Image: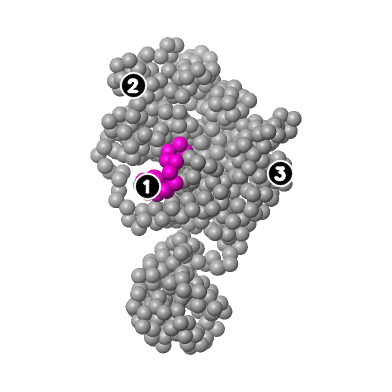
Amino acid sequence: MNPQPVVVAGALGECVHVAGVVNFLRLAGQAGWRTVFLGPAVPAGEMLRAARAQGAALVGVSYRLTPETGERLLAEFAEAADELRAAGVRFAFGGTPPVAERARAFRGFFDAVFDGSEAPDDVLAYLRGAPRTPTAADYPQTLVGRVAWKAPYPLLRHHFGLPTLEATRLGIAQIAEVRVLDVISLGIDQDAQENFYHPERQDPRRTGAGGVPVRCPDDYRALYAASRRGNFPLMRTYSGTDDFIRLAEMYVATINIAWAAVPLFWFNAMDGRGPHDLESSIRAHQQLIAWYGARDIPVELNEPHHWGMRDAADVIYVVAAYLSAYNARAFGVRDYIAQMMFNSPPGISDAMDLAKMLAILDLIAPLSLEVNGVGGKSGGFRIWRQTRVGLLSHPLDPEAARGHLAAATYLQMALKPHIVHVVGHTEAHHAATADDVIAACKVARRAIENAVRGAPDMVFDPRVQARKAELIAEAQVTLEAIRGLAPAAARGRTGPGVADPLTDPSTLARAVTAGLLDAPHLKANRFARGQIHTQIDERGACIAVDPRAGRPLSERERIARLSGV
C-alpha cells in the first residue's frame, strides 16, 4: 500500500496572509494528501527543513505582498530548493495575480502557479495528479468516471450551438480552453434532429434554426475535435425525433456520446417536433432506451419538465418522473440520470420546488435494486441526480437573470446533485455564445462552492416535508389509475392483457388521451385533453383546481371527473 503523500505549505518571508494557504491545504486533504501547515512569515530555510523532515512530495509557497520583493524572495528560494527539486519534490505557488505573474517566470521550478482565479475543482485536479498542461488521459471520459473524479463538486453541463458550424466549432474550443464546463450538450437545429438522414425533407430556410446545422458525421467529428483541449469536456447531443438508432450509432462513433436524453411522451406529433404519433413514438423511445442500456451508456429521460413547462400540476410532474425512471430500469439502463428542472412552472416557490424534487427522489429510490430488465439484462440500477434552472424562468434583465441563476443553483445544491445543468442567464434574450456559457458557469460555480462549504439543510423545513409527503400520496393515486387503464390481465385477472401497464406503450398513450396526464397548454391538442386547470396556491405549489369554484382538486377527485376513465 502506498503511503499517504505529504504536502507542506506556508507563507514565505514576511508575508502573514495565510487564508489561501489554509484553503489549499483543505483541498489537498480532500484529494488524499497528509497536510502540514507551516503558518505565516516562514523563512525559506525553515520551509525547506520542514519539507525534508516531513518527507514532503509537494511544497506550497505563498506570497501576497509587493511583486518586486516577492520576485527576489522566490529567486532565492528556488536556488536554495534546487537540491530538493532535483530529488523529485514538486513546488506550487499561490499569491495575488501580480505576484503570480512574477512566479510564472520560474517555470522550470514551479509546476503550478495559482493566482486565486481558479475554481476549487481546478486545484483539486492538480492535487489529484493532473498536470498543468493536461491531456485527455488526465480527465475521465465517461460520465461515471468524471463524477467520481470531480466529487464533491458536481459536473457542470451547458447547451451550446450557434447558427453556423464554424462559429460553434470555435466556441467549443474557447469553452474547453477556459475549463469551466465538464459537459458540452450540442444544441443542433431542428432539421438535424428530424431530417439528418433525409436531406430531401430539409428546408434551407430553416438552417441553423434552434442550433448548429450539422449535416454529416464529419460535422460532428469536427465539433468533437474542437473539444479536445483544456479540460477535455464530455460531449452529448439530442437523440433526434426520427431514425433514432441510426443517430445513436453515429453519436457513439463521432462524439463518444456521454449519455443519451430520451423522452417518453414528447418529440413527436403531439408537440410538433417529430413525425411519429404518440403511441408509436413511446414504443420507439423505449427501443432507443434499450439500445443505449445494452451498451452501458447512461440514459436521462428528459420527460417531467416538459409537463412542468406546460403548467401541469406538480403531481403530474412527479408521476412523469417516476414513469421515466421506471421505464429506464425496465429497458436495461444501468446508469440513470434523473433530471430535475426547477422553476417549472416559473411561479412555483423554492420550498414547494424542493419538495417536488424530494418526492421524486423518494419515489424512485426503491428502483435502485438488482433488476432483470425487459431485455433480459441483469445488473444494478444507479440513479445520478441532475438539476437545472427552469428553461422559462430567467428574467429578461441580464443582471436579474444572473441573480436568479445563482439563487436557483444554490437551492438545487440541497439535493447534492451529481450534475448541474447550467441554463445561461441570457436564455430569455438569445442563445448563449461561448462568452455567455463561460460567464454563466462562473456564476453557477460560485454558488456551488458556497454550498459545498456548508449550506443550511433546507430539506428538513417542515413545509417541504409536508408537501413532499402530500405529493407522494397523490402520485400513487395517479399511478394506480394509469395501471387501471390496462387490459384485465395486468390487474391480476385472467384474459388478454399486458405484463406491466407502466411500460406498455398503449397504456401509457391512453394515460395521455384519457387525461390522467394533462397540462393546460395542451388544450386543442389532438392527442391530449388539455382540460386540467392549474394555479399556484398560497404555498407556492402548482395544483389542479376546479375551474369554476377555483378550489383545489385532489387527484382522486380530478380523476373521478374524467370521462372514459
SS label for mark 2? loop
The label nearer to you, 1 versus 3, is 1
Specify which label sits upstream in the sequence, 1 or 3: 3
Q: Dot 2, crowdedness within 10 Å: few (<14), some or many (≥20)? A: many
- Amino acid carrying label 1: it is Ala
Residue 43 sits in which quadrant?
A: bottom left
Highlighted range, magenta: 390-411
Residue 322 vertical position relative to residue 437 in the rendered view, above or below: above
- The residue singled out by tag 3 in the image is 217
User: Which quarter of the figure is the C terminus placed in?
Assistant: top left
Residue 32 vertical position relative to residue 107 in the rendered view, above or below: above
Q: Position of residue 454 (x, y in %)?
A: 32, 56
Residue ranking furthest to the top:
563
- The residue singled out by tag 1 in the image is 407
- The residue singled out by tag 2 in the image is 545
Identify which residue, 111 or 533, lies in the foreground. 533
Residue 352 sits in which quadrant?
A: top left
Mark 2 to mark 1 CA distance (whole Å): 30 Å
- Dominant SS type (magenta): helix
Q: Are marks 1 and 3 in contact (CB under 8 Å)?
A: no
Mark 1 to mark 3 CA distance (whole Å): 39 Å
Specify which label sits upstream in the sequence, 2 or 3: 3
